[in-house]
Amino acid sequence: MTAQISETSYADPRLDGSLHGLFLRGLALSADRECFRVDGHGTTYAEAHRAALALAGAVADACGGAPRTVAVLGSKSGGAYTGLLAALYLGARAVPLHPDFPAARNRAVLEASRTDAVIADERGVAAYEAIGRPDLPLVAAEQPLSGEPLKEPRAVRPEDTAYILFTSGSTGRPKGVPTTHRAADSYFRTLRGRYDFGLGDAFTQTFDLTFDCAMFDLFCAWGAGARVVPLPMRAYRALPEFLAEERITVWFSTPAAIALARRSGALAPGALDGLRWSLFAGEPLHRHDAEDWRAAAPHSTVENLYGPTELTVTVTAHRLSQATPDERYLGGVVPIGPVHASLDHVLLAPDGSTDGDEGELCITGPQMFDGYLDPAENEGRFLDHDGRRWYRTGDRVRRWPDGEIGYLGRADDQVQVQGWRVELSEVGHAVRALDGVEDAVAVAVPRAGSHELVAFYTGRPTESPLLARELIAELPRAMVPRLLVHLAEFPMNANRKIDRSALRSRALTLLDSGRARS
């Protein structure tokens, strides 16, 4: 059974404002164009739509009705993309899972989200058995399906949850962050007013579906009738060639990707001249990295985006410009830009006041989530102020009179070392400024009621004591790391962010082994 595709089929006002309505908009604009291209194989909007309807029907058949929550166990694959669409078409809450995450974590997510069924791509099917939930129906997206395809995407209410992403929790359990269709609609309306994405664009996807920035790639592209191209790690070995071959015009990644590109020689001036937009988010973007990228992509507008998952992907954007005063690059970090006009913000000072221009960034507005899946996780995460509820980001910022915001670091980035209050981001910045150092991250390890600092860096290997002596000229002794450890590259988590937890574990091992500078 094949669903009839026509533009009028998707003029249903019940689908306006839904997340999957953005894909249907792309379908109406360019049914015969590719919506994604994976490993050289393209899939058109019409083909993906039919596959999603078939998957949705198979899930409904396996569940014996309409599932409320559907997990998508897959990576950046056609099966994962159509699986996400199928979950949305069912009007269900989509819960992305990564096949490479520990089975225990994925099992905890399935239980916390009360998942009714699992859609899996090829890698997901292989990982499913280890999760240990044989009671949940499994639908393999890339195998023959049973049941009748869904006739049409189901309508949803604005307050319905579109997807749930799980972030790290302070208790050791992942925290579920539900995002409603209303929040997503507000976000993507803001983006449509900012960017000129169109039919001819091709977006990279460097993020896995468990990272909220993946939603930016997919639904910005699909809402414009453009296509998405997952970026395999091997592409970094010949990045200019890959981007040119795939006719990529929109790049989006964490800043860590810049170092990967630099090591492969991809940042030669003009090497990435096909890009129109270059966007970075997820971690602080350092000025020298941003400027190197802009030189390699001279026709590209470079932006630094910022936002926690709880506020629907991103809430600020700074456009790189020669006109930005040097003093706004706090610690060498590119400003994060003004807050979106659709949102309100205040800066919470340590004394509880909100009338200053430095403090913890708190935001409210239509992109804010209603609370964690487990209400117990809400404690301490919200501010009641001025008759409204604000989300506390945990990030310290500085604001200038024109509304531009600079990033100072995490509120929990501050540690005590021998009685000194030490900002880890400041230590990292100082190490990064040393001759031969490309990038650096400082971590703190608890020791006897205080902390010991260890810095990891990439670039030219140098003896730790030599680097420490250079730092003594720049930093108080309490801020000089006990160890400065060279790495060929930083460990990355599945979302291509620097894995600070792995660095802390390594620092603890090194300190416990007795290795220290003299």
Image (cartoon, rainbow, N blue to C red):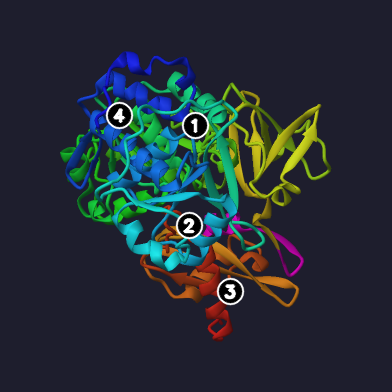
**Labels 2, 4: front one:** 4
What is the spatial separation of the Cα atoms under label 4 and label 1, in whole angstroms? 16 Å
| Quadrant in the picture for residue 58 | top left
Using the image, tell me which numbered label, if any, was put on residue 432.
2
What is the spatial separation of the Cα atoms under label 1 and label 3, in whole angstroms? 35 Å
What is the spatial separation of the Cα atoms under label 2 and label 1, in whole angstroms? 22 Å
| Quadrant in the picture for residue 427 | bottom right
Q: Is residue 153 left or right of residue 161?
A: left
Label 3 crowd (10 A; few <14 / some 14-19 / many >=20): many
Residue in the image at 56% along x and 37% along y? 179
**Labels 2, 1: front one:** 1
Q: Identify the secondary structure beneath mark 3.
A: loop
Q: Identify the secondary structure beneath mark 4.
A: loop
Image quarter in which the N terminus is found: top left
Identify the residue under disc 1. 318
Identify the residue under disc 3. 482
Magenta span contains residue 422: yes
Write the start and end of the magenta stretch as one range.
416-433
Residue 196: give x, y in percent of width and height.
36, 21
